[in-house]
C-alpha cells in the first residue's frame, strides 16, 4: 500500500479559509490523502464565525480537532493549495500547487462566509474525493 499524499491548505493567518479547507478535506477527502492547514503567521484562535458556521453546517467542531499552526510545523507536503493570498504566498517544498483564489470572509456577513465555505467544499470534493 502506498503512503498517503499530504495536502496543505495555506493562507496567511491560518485562522479561516485554510482551517475550513482542512476540516472539509478530512470530511470529504478520500483515503489517499492526509490534510493539514498552516500560515506564515497565526492568530490565537480559529475565526469564530468559521467555527460557528462549520459546526452548524457540518457538525464539525474545528476548535476540538484543529489549531492555528505555522508552515514550519508541517510534515513534508506533497500538494499545496493556497487560498488566495493577499500578500506574498508562503513557499513550501512540494510536488504540486494550485491557488483557489478565495476572498477572506473574516469580518464579513454570514452570506459571504457561506459563499466561501461552499466554494471550498466544491473544490475539496472535486479535487480530493
Image (tube, rainbow, N blue to C red):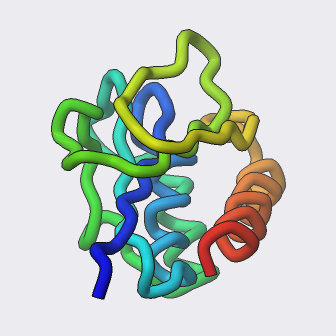
Looking at the rendered image, the quarter that the N terminus falls into is: bottom left
* Image side of residue 21 versus residue 86, left or right: left
The number of callouts visible is: 0
| Residue sitting at x 39%, y 65% | 5
Q: Is 94 above or below relative to 86?
A: below
Q: Position of residue 41 (x, y in %)?
A: 32, 23
Q: Is residue 33 above or below residue 117?
A: below
Q: Residue furthest top?
A: 88
Residue 58, quarter of the rendered image: bottom right
Residue drawn at (54%, 11%) of the image: 88
124 versus 87 height, above or below = below
Question: Is 37 drawn above or below residue 43 in the view shown?
Answer: below
Q: Which quarter of the figure is the C terminus placed in?
A: bottom right
Is residue 73 toward the left or the right of residue 42 in the image? left
Residue plotted at (54% across, 59% down): 21
Q: Nearer the viewer, residue 3 or 116?
A: 3
Q: Give me the residue at 48% from left, 50% from top.
A: 79
Residue 29: where, in percent of width, then height? Answer: 53, 79
Tell me residue 27's x, y (percent): 49, 82
Which of 53 and 123 lies nearest the eye of the viewer?
A: 123
Given residues 46 and 41, the one toward you in this image is: 41
Question: Residue farthest to the front?
Answer: 1
Place of residue 17 in the rendered image (x, y in percent of width and height, measured from the top left): 56, 47
Amino acid at each position: 500500500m502506498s503512503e498517503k499524499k499530504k495536502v496543505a491548505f495555506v493562507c496567511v493567518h491560518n485562522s479561516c479559509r485554510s482551517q475550513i479547507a482542512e476540516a472539509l478535506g478530512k470530511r470529504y477527502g478520500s483515503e489517499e490523502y492526509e490534510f493539514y492547514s498552516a500560515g506564515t503567521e497565526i492568530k490565537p484562535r480559529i475565526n469564530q464565525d468559521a467555527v460557528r458556521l462549520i459546526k452548524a453546517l457540518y457538525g464539525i467542531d474545528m476548535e476540538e480537532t484543529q489549531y492555528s499552526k505555522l508552515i514550519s510545523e508541517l510534515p513534508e507536503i506533497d500538494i499545496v493549495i493556497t487560498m488566495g493570498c493577499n500578500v506574498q504566498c508562503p513557499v513550501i517544498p512540494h510536488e504540486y500547487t494550485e491557488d483557489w483564489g478565495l476572498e477572506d470572509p473574516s469580518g464579513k456577513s454570514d452570506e459571504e462566509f457561506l459563499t466561501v465555505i461552499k466554494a471550498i467544499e466544491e473544490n475539496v470534493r472535486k479535487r480530493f474525493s
